[in-house]
Image (cartoon, grey):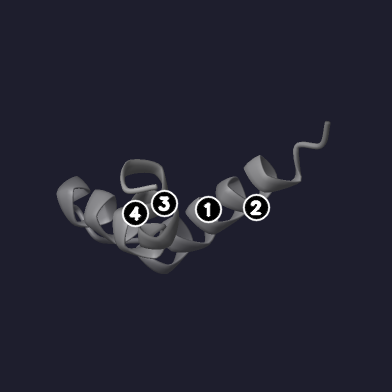
Amino acid sequence: MTSGIMEGINNRIMVIKRQGYGFTNVDNLMLRLAYANRARLLAAFWP
């Protein structure tokens, strides 16, 4: 088994956090993370 998929997701989260540095609203960060991973979310809930 490889952890490449998980490392990719973590990398994407870190990039989004870096891009949003200075924003005080955590809700917007969560929405941005969900939007960035929308394809994975859709695949998980609507197979």
- Relative placement, left or right, of 27 versus 9 is left
Q: Which mark is residue 43?
A: 3
- Relative placement, left or right, of 36 versus 15 is left
Q: Nearer the viewer, mark 1 or mark 2?
A: 2
Q: Nearer the viewer, mark 3 or mark 1?
A: 3
For this orientation, the residue located farthest to the right is: 1
- Which type of secondary structure does the marked residue at label 1 adopt? helix
- Relative placement, left or right, of 29 versus 17 is left
Mark 2 = which residue? 8
Residue type pointed to by label 1: Met
Residue type pointed to by label 4: Leu
For this orientation, the residue located farthest to the top is: 1
Q: Position of residue 16 (x, y in %)?
A: 44, 61
Q: Which mark is residue 27?
A: none
Mark positioned earlier in the residue sequence (4 or 1): 1
Residue that appears at 40% across and 43% down: 44
Residue type pointed to by label 3: Ala
Q: Which mark is residue 42?
A: 4
Residue that appears at 39% across and 63% down: 36
Mark 1 = which residue? 14
Mark positioned earlier in the residue sequence (1 or 2): 2
For the residues marked 3 and 4, what is the alpha-carbon distance in whole angstroms? 4 Å
